[in-house]
Image (tube, grey):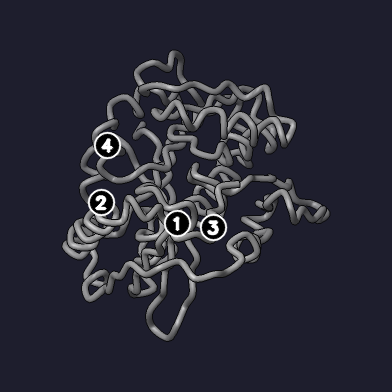
Amino acid sequence: MAVPAPSSAWITIRVEVAHEVADAVANFLVETGASGVLVEADGARTRLEAPVPAAAEAQVVAAVERYLTSLGEIAPAARGATLAAVPVPAVDWEALWRRHHRPMPVGRRLLVAPPWDVPRPAGREVLVIEPGMAFGTGQHATTRACLEAIEAAVGTGQVRSALDVGTGSGVLALALARLGVERVVALDTDPAVVPLARANLARNGAARVALLAGPLAAVRGRFDLVVANLLADAIVAEAGALARAVGPGGRLIVSGLVAEQLLAVRAAYPGWRVTETRAEGAWRTLTLVREP
């Protein structure tokens, strides 16, 4: 578990933003090198606190400043965010980390839980995920929406094969396997992510999921369901490859989008129809099928 020890070698990046964009900023902090993000709502704003190595302070602060500026161009709620770097207080980070990551029911059949708090609720598939550097613990709105969309797609009885693009922690691939999909392939462009995903899958008895590191073009074959929880730029750039990976009559689930990006994403998939849109805060998740 990637939890920093209290030390002068760490500083806290503190960002205060509107609730609507808090998830987006939290995700960016993790991608930029934070070991985790603590979230605290206060009135109309949310405070995010992310520990990073002190040596990386200037680099991370600059990256977050650029991100907030660009996010403000497409999401007005991001404007007026405040950013500060403060010394790490002498607190028990592991206790705070564990308090933040709690079991979370998702949809009708799933529950995502950390290894230290695993309930056994009747009627739900429990996905035990170790929070760490890989994205996908169920805390983020896009992960939850993807899990719900996967549940709905599998519920049709027409999904025998599935591809998870940008697998991160492996939680989406795990859900596919546990919901009964016979053939599941999980892909990530970051080779360092694959061992983390493999450990999570093994922990849950889903070692049969095929894990690959590399570009989407390296995947052979077509699938009944393709899931891509990425960012809008990647979903647009990879539109051709994602479309080709979906077999006849199959579905494509794309996520990581804010409302202002939907038109650009829709334009990248001519000949496809949106059958379902899931919304939580600023985030949107689409399920698409080819027009007949």
Q: Decide: few, some or many residues near mark 2? Use Cα within 10 Å; few <14, some 14-19, many ≥20.
A: few
> Residue 131: horizontal and vertical position, in percent?
58, 49
Above/below status of 144 relative to 268: below
Return the disc, 1 or 2, that comes first in the chain's sequence: 2
Residue underneath mark 1: 278
Q: Residues within 10 Å of mark 1 (few under 14, many from 20)?
A: some
Place of residue 24 in the rendered image (x, y in percent of width and height, measured from the top left): 36, 59
Mark 3 or mark 1, earlier in chain: 3
Q: Amino acid at mark 1?
A: Arg
Q: Earlier in the sequence, mark 4 or mark 3?
A: 3
Amino acid carrying mark 3 in the image? Gln
Q: Position of residue 25 (x, y in %)?
A: 35, 60
Counting other residues with Cα less than 10 Å from the Cα at mark 3, is it few (<14), some (14-19), or many (20 or more)?
A: some
Instruction: Report the residue marked by disc 4.
Output: 269
Q: Which sits earlier in the primary sequence, circle 3 or circle 2?
A: 2
CA separation in Å, label 3 and label 1:
16 Å
Q: Residue drawn at (83%, 54%), measured in percent from left and top?
A: 122
Mark yes or no: residue 60 visible: yes
Say whether disc 1 or disc 4 marks the residue closer to the N-terminus. 4
As helix, strand or loop, the secondary structure at mark 2 comes to helix
> Toward the viewer: 184 or 46?
46
Residue 163 vertical placement versus 62 (above, below): above
Mark 2, residue position: 59
| Residue visible at 35% across and 29% down in the picture | 242
In which image quadrant can residue 160 be found?
top right
Q: Nearer the viewer, residue 164 or 10?
A: 10
Residue drawn where x is 73% and y is 47% of the image: 126
* CA distance for labels 4 and 3: 29 Å
